[in-house]
């Protein structure tokens, strides 16, 4: 029994390290995109709807809040609350995607091939939106596993991994939001 | 037994409470960023510092980076 617990702890430590190494490597692409934005646009920014930018940002912020609650509830064995909070997180993620891809992409006064602002805006939001999409898919898998009772208060690495990934998406957007919607004068 | 149950409930409340405080702080800072970005765009670059501060809080309190350096046996 003791051996089993020890091996789970070892595996967990290895999983955590692996996930963080993946996130660090993934963040290099996001840093590259942000540097491209600074080099190409400098003290300017794409002309975007700042209120819409705030709304989608708040949606993502709320989603992180509910994801944290979901993880805490699972860690204390409260499965119904975990399922509820994970579902809310997924819904907010989908609303974020609809806000950015479904609305902002449609109302932006430029296309992906309309010079630097278009290239910067669509590549940054597109790459981030793809991560949100994969995050929602991951959350769905975790939610479904939770529904089937595959996690316990003691062992729920899947929930922890999905939560850390989801918060990572939020952290990236914190910088992208400033770079796209707030930094510089619109062109 | 009852003490243990109280401790677990207390720990859950504390963790949920910390999540609320972090969320409120992030919300206030985000709204502050928005105001500065709208009324004083030249100061926009300084908002990257605020974003870094917000990111630090998420990494510490939501992503629990500290778990990397502990031997926490549970999945939390």
Image (tube, coloured by chain):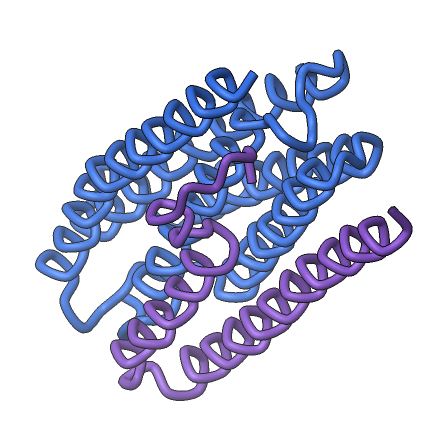
A14 relative position to A105: left or right: left
Q: Is residue A182 left or right of residue B7?
A: left
Residue B14 x %, y % = 71, 63
Image quarter where the C terminus of chain B lies is top right
Q: Residue furthest top?
A: A148
Name the residue: 59% across, 59% down.
A58
Residue A117 higher or lower than A91, as above or below: below
A137 and B63: which is toward the camera: B63
Residue at 9 percent across and 59 percent down: it is A39
**Which residue sits at x=53%, y=23%?**
A138
Does residue B45 lie above or below A50 as drawn? below
Q: Nearer the viewer, residue A187 or B4?
A: B4
Count of labels in the image: 0
Task: Give residue A14's position: percent from left, percent from top.
Answer: 32, 28
Q: Considering depth in this image, is B4 or B72 the residue closer to the camera?
A: B4
**Residue A17, image quadrant:** top left
Q: Position of residue A52 (x, y in %)?
A: 55, 58
- Left or right, A90 with reference to A41: right
Drawing shade for chain A: blue
Q: Colour of chain B?
A: purple
């Amino acid at each position: 029994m003791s051996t089993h617990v020890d091996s789970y702890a070892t595996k967990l430590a290895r999983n955590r390290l692996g996930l963080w190494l993946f996130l660090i490597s993934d963040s290099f692409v996001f840093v590259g995109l942000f540097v491209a934005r600074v080099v190409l646009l400098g003290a300017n920014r794409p002309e975007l709807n700042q209120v819409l930018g705030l709304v989608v940002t708040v949606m993502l912020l709320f989603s992180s809040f509910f994801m944290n609650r979901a993880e805490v509830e699972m860690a204390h064995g409260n499965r119904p609350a975990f399922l509820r909070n994970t579902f809310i997180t997924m819904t907010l993620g989908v609303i974020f995607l609809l806000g950015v891809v479904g609305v902002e992409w449609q109302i932006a006064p430029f296309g992906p091939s309309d010079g630097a602002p278009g290239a910067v805006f669509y590549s940054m939001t597109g790459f981030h939106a793809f991560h949100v999409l994969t995050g929602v898919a991951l959350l769905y898998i975790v939610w479904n596993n939770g529904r089937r009772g595959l996690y316990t208060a003691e062992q729920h690495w899947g929930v922890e991994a999905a939560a850390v990934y989801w918060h990572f998406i939020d952290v990236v957007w914190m910088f992208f939001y400033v770079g796209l919607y707030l930094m510089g004068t619109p062109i | 037994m009852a003490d243990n149950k109280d401790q677990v409930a207390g720990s859950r409340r504390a963790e949920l409470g910390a999540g609320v405080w972090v969320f409120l702080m992030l919300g206030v800072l985000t709204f502050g960023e928005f105001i500065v970005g709208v009324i004083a765009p030249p100061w926009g670059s300084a908002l990257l510092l605020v974003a870094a501060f917000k990111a630090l809080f998420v990494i510490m309190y939501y992503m629990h980076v500290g778990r990397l350096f502990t031997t926490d046996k549970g999945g939390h």
